Structures are given as structure tokens and as C-alpha cells.
Amino acid sequence: QASLMLLQQAVDLHARVHDATESLADLLLRLKDAAARLGEFEVEHTAVEALLATTDEAAQPLLVCELLVRREHLRFSTARGFLRVEPMRRAAQLSRRWPGSWQHGFALAEVAHASLWADTPDAQDAVAAAVEAADGIDHPRVTAYAFAAAAMGAEFSEQPGGPALAARGVQGAAEARDWWGFVHASLWEANTTASNAEPAWAGVLRRRREQLTVLGGPHPYLAWLSINEADALVRSGDWRGATALLRVALGSDPGTSGDVHARLVAARLAVAQGRQHEAEDHLARADELSADTTAFLALQFDATRALVRTGAGDPRGAYSAAMTGLLSAGVPPTLCEWLCPLAARALADLVADAKEHGEDPGGHLQLVDDLVGRFPHVIPDGSMSNLVYRRQVDALDALYAAEVARARRDPDEVALWRRAAEALDNVHPWDAAYAAYRAGEAVLIRTGGTREEAATLLRRAATLATALGADPVLDDVTALAATARITLDTLEPAPDTAVGMLPGLTKREREILGHIVAGRTYGEIARTLYLSEKTVSSHVSNILRKTGSANRVDLARRAQHAQAHGSDR
């Protein structure tokens, strides 16, 4: 760090010194190399930009080639923008007269890398050209990037051999002490080994993180691996392990891109556990740090934004965020598997809101039809050849179908929620808790199930939500169970609370509704209000008719929804 500061000062003072022994270009090159060793992305980016502005392309084409490619890496690492194909192609064009140079092989590898993300028609041809060049050049840095691109190409084309290709890339990066290449190849080793919700995915990154520590890799690169490992742990439900890794990663500056990724992971965890303000703060900071969030396909901006808006009770915002990701150009963004279920959930919430306010839900239902017509199934992120990943995608597809059925009030809604809850169990724990709650709700409100089945589903949802600290789902489960007079073995009974009332009810009906939400029987209500049970039953029938509720469980849910939205009518 001290030498880096001295080099920065030397660069700043160079213009004031007459007859300096070192040229500005030499100082900038030394500054670039020192910053690269330390993972100081901003300093290195400044040096690279200055070199590109002052270097004669005709006189030093190989240096300009190297700088053009490295600038793309640094734009990513400083969250200025995602990898672009054209600068990589320009670099390859500049170096084409020196086909045996490492700079040319480096450029070809990154043409392949950027082309795969952009989903260009010639992307796989670019991968083949990069690997062929790497075999001929035999330079560790070229090996690192060419074989990472080969692993990426294998994953995108559902071909075997990805882990071995990526491991060869990691080996080359370690030999070259190219930390960016090391992390890049490690991530593709994990991606081609398992799905990112499997322990094996996080295990690959843990081993590579430990290797990077032994090699003396700088903190920003260790943080990059730690944050991705934490991301995987959140998905698998190990939120404590994820929290510990995030704290380590953010203990000192992880670089702008690392900071963005860490905040997106933290936002997802916070909203799932009911810390809405924290989630919104993390997402706002990630947005602030990134120049173009939609273009960052490797980061889960769209799904995270949809989740945060869902937690905020903003289904319109959630739908908009999910559709932004679904309609983005190029390879689908990270967490794209969740975008269809999130869009359908938002539309189902909008339909429910419209019906509860006596409005026509036809426009929202048309959007449901449009969504399913365009995306009949969820969008996978990568190869479907992995049987475990295929099971995960199928489970999210079941969740998608259940949300669509909820929006449409489909007669098969109960069966679809049962299927989703079963499919998600032991696959996606956060979604499994939510689906079990919805399945229990559907059994109680619709037809096609028993009270005992509803109790089993709600208890499963409560157990999962308690283990995950998923307070929003736990609150919904607790309220529904209390209304339905279902005991949740591990939970205290919900206390009596005042509820937001529905419009058009008399004072007595509003009073009785409060007792229904508290979960009291007709006999308990009658004794409390000095009425006969027959009178209470008559009042409840009138309330059901006025509110359009299917039964007392549905009625209680509507009243609680009104309270949550600040209604007291």
C-alpha cells in the first residue's frame, strides 16, 4: 500500500518535474501493475484509462490490446458497466499480426467470454478459436481465460467437461498470479460442477478461497469469492453462515462490484427475514454504486428488486422489476428462474387487491395470460443436464403454476399449491415455507382438502419459517392458524388484536368480525356478546355475503389484509 501511494504521488507530480528520469508512461505502467497486485480496482482503472489516452496505438499495439481487455475487467469490477464485445474484438484485431503473443490469446479468450454473455451467434466459434490459440501460445494467463471461457461455453451448450476445463483455467491463473482470472475461472468451475443452491457449489468456492489465501491473493478477490459463497448459502437456507461471510467480505473494501453483490445478497436475506428497511437500504446502495444495473447480467438486480418490492407490499413495482429481467437482452440474468414466479405472484396480489376493493381485475388477468403466453415455464439459468438443477427448476415451475392459479382462482389451485409445496421442500427452503403457507390457505378457503391437511401444511410452513427466521411468512402462518383454530406446536397462540374492518358492515358485524379474526368459535363469541349462537351464525352469514368471502377463514384473511393496508372502514 505504501509503494502504491508513492507511485500515485509520483504520477501526480510528474508534470511539475523538469528532466524527470522516468517517463509518465513508465510510472503509469508501474502504478497499474502495483494496483493489480493489491486489487485496487479504482486506482488501476485510472491508470489504464490514462495509458489508453496517451499510448500511440500504432507504435504499441500489443500494449493497447492488453489495456483494452483489462479496462473491460475493471469496468466490471468498479461497477461502471458489464463486459462489452466490441472492445474485445478491437483488441484481437490490433494484435492479429502477432498470433503467438500472449496479448492476442488474452484478447481472443475475452472475445469468447463477452460473446457468450451477449449470446452472439458466433460465441461458440469464438470459444473454439480461443482454446486453439491457448494451446499454441502456452502462456498461463492465456490458459486462465481461454479455459474459463471454454467451461462457460460448455455450460451454455449443455456439454460435459466444464469442471475440468475451468480447473485448468484456475491452474493457469494461479501460475500467472492473475487474481481476476483466478476468481473468474473458480466461479465457472462452481457453475459447471453443481447448481448454486447445492452444497457442492459453495464447496468449490470455499476450496478456491482457501487456495487463494495461501497464494496471498488480495482482500478484494477473497471477498469476491466469499460473497458468491454467501450467496449460495442464502439460497440453501444457511443464513447464519452467509451472514458470517458477508461480514468478513465487507470488513474492508471489497471493491465496488463486490460491494454491489454483497448488498444484493444482504437485501434478499433481509427482505426474507422481514427487515424491510434494511433490504431497501442495501438495494438503494447497490443501485447507487452501479452505472447500469440492467446490463449487469451476472448480478441478480432484477430478481432482488422484485423481491424487495414484494416485501414492501408493492406488487406493481415487483411485476415491473421481474419483467425487466425477463425481457432483458442476451443471456438471462442471474436468478432468472425466480422471475416468472415473482411476476405471477405480483399479478395474483393485484387481482386479490382489486377484488377486495370491488374493482375489475380484468386488466391484471390479461397480464397473467400475456405472461403465461410468452413464458409458459420458468427461465433456467444455464444447463438443464444437471438432474439436481432440473429438479430445482421444476419446483419453481410448480410455484409459477400455483401463483397463476391463485390469480385466476383456478379450480385446481389447491392441487397446484400442494404440488408446489411438495416440490419445493428440501429444494428451495424459503420458497418451500411460503408455498406450504399458501397451500394451507388454499385448503382452508377453497374446496378439495381437509382441516387436518391444512394443519399439517401450516405446521410445516411454521417449522421452516422459524428455522429460517422468515418472519413475514411466520406472521402470515400464525394469523391464519389462529383464525382457523389450528394449533402450531412450536408457536404461542396469537393474541387478540383489533383488525382493519371491511366496508359496508354494521357496528355489530364489525364487532363479530374482530372475534372471528381472533379465532373464536361461535359459542365463544355468543357468550362474550350475550347473544345466541344462532344469532352469531346469522351475522356471520351476512358478513360473508357482504364481503364476498368463501368462508370465515377467507373472511379473516380479507380483514387482516385491510388492516395491513391501513384501512379502517
Image (tube, helix red, strand yellow):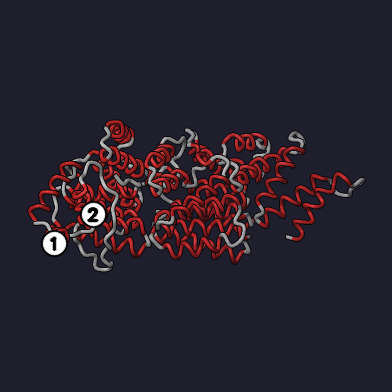
In which quadrant is the C terminus drawn? top left
Nearer-the-camera pick, 178 or 350: 350
From the top left corner, tell me how far across and down residue 122 is, in percent: 49, 34
Identify residue type, mark 1: Arg
Per the model, the C-alpha gap separating discs 2 and 1 is: 15 Å
Indicate whether 379 appears above or below 254.
above
In this rendering, position of residue 114 left or right of residue 203: right
Per the image, the residue denoted by label 2 is 514
At 62% from the left and 36% from the top, the residue drawn is 87
The residue under the point 47% across, 53% down is 277
> Looking at numbered disc 2 in the image, what kind of residue is underneath it?
Gly
Helix, strand or loop for disc 1: helix
Taking depth in this image into account, of 362 and 195 the one nearest to the observer is 362
Looking at the picture, tell me which residue is in the foreground, 541 or 487: 541
Q: Does residue 326 appear in this view?
A: yes
Residue drawn at (17%, 46%) of the image: 543
Within 10 Å of disc 2 (Cα), the crowding (few <14, some 14-19, many 20+) is many
Q: Position of residue 404 (x, y in %)?
A: 27, 41
Residue behind mark 1: 527
Cβ atoms at labels 2 and 1 below 8 Å apart: no
> Looking at the picture, how far across and down is residue 171, in whole percent?
56, 57
User: In the image, is residue 122 above or below residue 563?
Assistant: above
Whether residue 164 can be seen here: no
In the rendered structure, the answer to whether residue 227 lies left or right of residue 438 reads right
